[in-house]
Image (cartoon, rainbow, N blue to C red):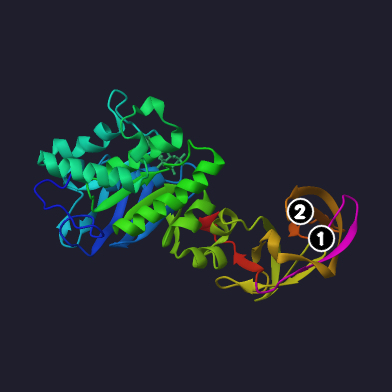
Amino acid sequence: MTQGQPAARPGTAGGAAWRQLRLEQVTRRFGSSDALADLDLTIERGEFIALLGPSGCGKSTALNCLAGLLPLSRGSIWRDDTRLDTLPAERRGFGMVFQNYALFPHMSVRGNVAFGLKMQRRPRAEVARRTDEAIRLVRLEEHAGKLPGQLSGGQQQRVAIARAVVLEPSLVLMDEPLSNLDAMLRLEMRTEIRRLHQSLGLTTVYVTHDQEEALSMSDRLVVLRNGRVQQIGTPEQVHTQPANRHVAGFMGYRNILPMRAVAGNVVEGDGLRLTGTAVGTVSSGDSVEVAIRPEDVHLGHGIPVTVGVVEYQGREVAAEVHTAGGVRLHLRTGKGLRPGDQAEVALDPDRLLIFPIVPEDA
Ligand code: ATP
């Protein structure tokens, strides 16, 4: 929908060059509650950004504000020096892919992909060329003449993606585009979307509640909770240095234990005394929560435990164990464990994160 702009060269999607898209204090209220509050985010051209968080955290609200489908209650959106939030959706030049693909059922794959270009009244030869190119990119050449109803879910999703990218949008917005697909197809499409992003030089904002999807696809993640940003960082930063206990919980730190600090890096509770790494300021006597991933709880010399539930997971088992003081821990190990076994576990102090409990954060 980049009306009046010249067609972009491959790898320069988005027509005229731009550098940054900025969201400043973007806020959207529904009644008396903020579905999204004060979102500040600068997206560099070419980035793949994932908006991640649990259901109801404001991901779709953020995407819809960006798309122009929801007016902002406060804040502004900029593409370099051009203010976008005051423009209607169709003049922002964004492409959208949603979970219900919303394809035209009576049009062939080719018709669906060509539709936007025809609406832009592009010359017939250009429509044909760009449509063919987009269909080739999503590898649907053999299905170009079929109707959406004759395609699998994954193929329909690829049509939806082709329909968006054929317009060479300055930004592609995707809202849980893979949620209707089975596990195998989701994996395949992840790679496909990332490949398209790279080969077309797209800038992508991708909403998901699946942290694995977000970690594997994005350059940076924005983790939301209750409409507020919890952390913005690379997958590695968010994964290894979660900013708070909510992000930790969301990023697979399955063991989260309430304890009391006896020094900056030492905590006690339920008969355990553990050494970890404080995230933020922790003083002796503070109530804290410690977080550690199952894969960082190792069998070895340390805390005596009794093995409870054991789940087979291919190369490894996931086990729940408990200490004499009643603390339950989840661990993963390649060693065989059976319910009722006695074992000892050690927790890696570098990987055991100690979070202060912040009142407004509760
Ligand atoms: P999900 O993963 O379940 O789609 P989400 O993170 O995308 O969730 P949003 O759809 O952005 O969450 O919703 C954020 C909050 O705003 C929720 O509490 C939701 O109930 C509320 N909300 C969203 N749309 C409206 C609306 N039109 N009217 C009132 N409240 C709304």
Ligand 1's image quarter is: top left
What secondary structure predominates along the stretch shown in magenta? Answer: loop
Q: Pick the quarter of the image with the C terminus.
A: bottom right
Where does the image place residue 45, in percent across and percent down from the top left?
A: 28, 62
Identify the disc placed on residue 126: none
The residue located at (23%, 60%) in the rendering is 12
Indicate left or right for 190 with 118 as reference. Answer: right
User: Looking at the image, do the residues carrying marks 1 and 2 touch, with CB atoms under 8 Å apart?
Assistant: yes
Residue with the mark numbered 2: 317
Is 94 left, or right, of 82 in this rendering? right
Q: CA distance from mark 1 to mark 2?
A: 8 Å
Quadrant housing the N terminus: top left
Q: Amino acid at mark 2?
A: Val
Range drawn in magenta = 335-350
Q: Is residue 317 above or below residue 154?
A: below
Q: Please, is residue 185 above or below residue 347 in the view?
A: above
Q: Which of disc 2 and disc 1 is earlier in sequence?
A: 2
Mark 2 neighbour class, 10 Å CA radius: few under 14, some 14 to 19, many 20 or more: some
User: Which of the numbered marks, if any, corresponds to residue 335?
Assistant: 1
Q: Residue at x 54, y 53 (%)?
A: 212
Q: Quadrant of residue 166?
A: top left
User: In front: 305, or 156?
Assistant: 156
CB of residue at label 2: within 8 Å of ligand 1? no
Q: Tell how many labels.
A: 2
Q: Is residue 89 visible?
A: yes
Q: Secondary structure at mark 1?
A: loop
Which quadrant of the figure has residue 271? bottom right
Is residue 333 a member of the stretch shown in magenta? no
Please give the name of the residue rendered at 71% of the width and 71% of the height, measured from the top-left corner.
348
Q: Secondary structure at mark 2?
A: strand
The spot of residue 53 in percent (x, y) is: 48, 50
Q: Is residue 67 visible?
A: no
